[in-house]
Image (spheres, rainbow, N blue to C red):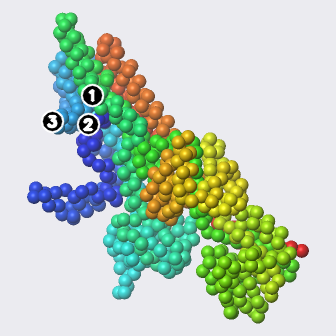
Amino acid sequence: MSRECCGGDEAEDRPVLLGLGVRPPAPTSGDGTAQSRADSDEHDEHDEHDELAPWWRDRALLLPAVSGVLLAVGYGLEWSGLEVPARVVQAASLVAGAWTFVPGALRRLLRGRLGVGLLMTIAAIGAVVLGHVGEAAALAFLFSIAEALEDRAMDRAKHGLRALLALMPETARLSRLSGEVEVPATQVRELDLLVVRAGERLATDGVVTEGRSSLDTSAITGESIPVEVGPGDAVPAGAVNGTGALLVEATADGRDNSLTTIVRLVEEAQARKGERARLADRIARPLVPIVLVVAALVAAWGLVVGEPGLWVQRALVVLVAASPCALAIAVPVTVISAIGAASRFGMVIKSGAAFEELGTVRAVAIDKTGTLTRNRPEVVETVTAPGTTREQALALAAALEARSTHPLAAAILATTPVPARADDVQGLPGRGLQGTVDGRRVRVGTTRWIDPGELAGSAAALEEKGMTVVVVAVDDAPAAVLGIRDELRPEAAEAVRHLAADGVAVTMLTGDNERTALALAREAGIDEVRAAQLPQDKERAVRESAQRVPTAMIGDGVNDAPALAAASVGIAMGVGGSAAAVESADVAFTGTDLRLVPQGLAHARRGRRIMTGNIVLALAIIVVLFPLALFGVLGLAGVVLVHEVAEVVVILNGLRAARGARALPVLPRPEARLMEPAARTTS
């Protein structure tokens, strides 16, 4: 029933699988064949919809509660002078409390495993033999209630993951040749067409094929701004549709999508231990047999000095005083709480080790394209010649770019959704486009091909700002120069300021040219820039930094994968990040808001402090109680009380790691920036 709390416990015998998207191996029957999938599915369904019961309805707390009530009644009878009824009631209290841990301790002993439950069992039996039934009952009650609270704390910490999967709708509406049909969400398959009406959640990942709407992805990505989507846009599982109806082509099965992947990664993270967890284990595992040996020696000393009763009693107290229960749970409850809390604001931490390492980071290397920037070139600035307006220049350029597949064409077309008709359009590789619009000869291209003339100074100024300059010429006369750049994310500068305020050094890594990199770095407030970096250059830079100081690498592309793997902690940004980046990273953010990075680092630092405090407290309890128990200063009841109160304190302190994630303030809509780009007209 209860969880053993130190080395050799039964928790080691089972994987940390919560029934949240990760299926354990199917149980086998006696002849080795797998049992029916229906049974397994029924079990999964039960787990997935299981909710954390209020403490007064928690059956795991029932026996400890009964034990506590009987113990109080027994002490009351004893103080009233009713010795025999008191002993009977105290014995009943002992049985109720011991039933929660003695059977498990004996089963583990038969398998050659020693645990704190065994120490408590021996101490309780010894107390009864010596006639201290009340103290034995107190030990059983306090240990059973501490174990039950520990189990509940672990369940509460993990319950946040169930909330994630609760974002998945139970059913999905599919478009078939025969009409719309409703099926369980788990039966959705890749390439199915989902009909998503206003206010409904998406059953799996997909791509919009028809319709336009806005999606609320805040529960998944931690970003509060609704995302406008239309045909061709990717949409994540669990997002809530806005006012429009959508037809979405599924890109993942209902049981294997981005949301279930998040849960799987978090489950795996909770199963993998970090440095502090390993430290606690290294101390706790050998401590149990050492305590047994020391207690035996203390009892043997009683035979030597001729006072076996006194020293056997002290040996029992030593068994309890030196038990490493609080030490063994000092780290797990903190890690599980912190990782579960992080997942709720869009931060997926893949292991306890990664979480601990994240709390030490003092330097961050950030990839530019797609991480610091939107990875979506925009017309940032337009300078026009006399007689030409900005709208006219953009309309002429868009008319030609409508025939182009160049990456910059999309930036120009975004300013003019319905371009005019262009005739005789020709593409000249490395130069640009030329054609006829409304009877006028128009050219759009580089400054190397089209002389900007009187706009040359403006073109040079735009280039100094790190922009790609496109010249628009009408009848061989320059009409405008357009400055196009992959702009910084609106929150980038704020995120960098927060990192700097926390004492974290920031470096920009990019394969772009130095002029563009420096211009964007100035806007973001980044002092150190490494431009023209190949993937191997990024990997070398991050590795060298990690050798000097704990370093995190933040990226989202395939070319970032080597650097992510070389960093102390690799951080992949965004649900749209490449699979290589996500696999290479230790931490993945489901959103793209860079302010999540300083928030995540602060969360990890706080969790690391809580872990350290728990370990120090747990060790201090053992160091202080051991001599007090050995020399008879504290009796069995006193030691049990101090020890189990300390364990509860450690649990409650660890649960504090689940707090502290705050909502990010709303940023201005990116669309608003596109509506009013900078524009100047020369006189």
Q: Residue at x 46, y 48 (%)?
A: 341
From the viewer's perspective, is residue 586 above or below residue 63? below
Task: Estimate the x, y position of residue 630 in percent, counting from the top left.
Answer: 30, 14
CA gap, disc 2 and disc 1:
10 Å
Q: Which amino acid does label 1 sit on?
A: Val
Q: Do the residues labelled 2 and 1 touch (CB within 8 Å)?
A: yes
> Which labelled disc corresponds to residue 110?
3
Instruction: Tell me the kind of residue under disc 2.
Output: Gly
Provide the secondary structure element on which disc 2 rests: loop
| Residue at image location 40% in from the left, 60% down from the top | 261
Q: Residue 366: x percent and y percent?
A: 59, 54
Determine whether, in the image, residue 232 is placed left or right of residue 50: right
When the figure is inspected, residue 389 is found, relative to residue 107, above or below; the finding is: below
Please tell me which residue lies in front, 308 or 144.
Answer: 308
How many residues crowd around disc 2 within 10 Å: few (fewer than 14), some, or many (20 or more)? Answer: many
231 shown above or below 546:
below
Q: What residue is disc 1 on?
A: 288
Q: How crowded is mark 1: few (under 14 residues within 10 Å), some or many (20 or more)?
A: many
The residue where tag 2 is placed is: 8
- Work out whether 467 lies above or below 133: below
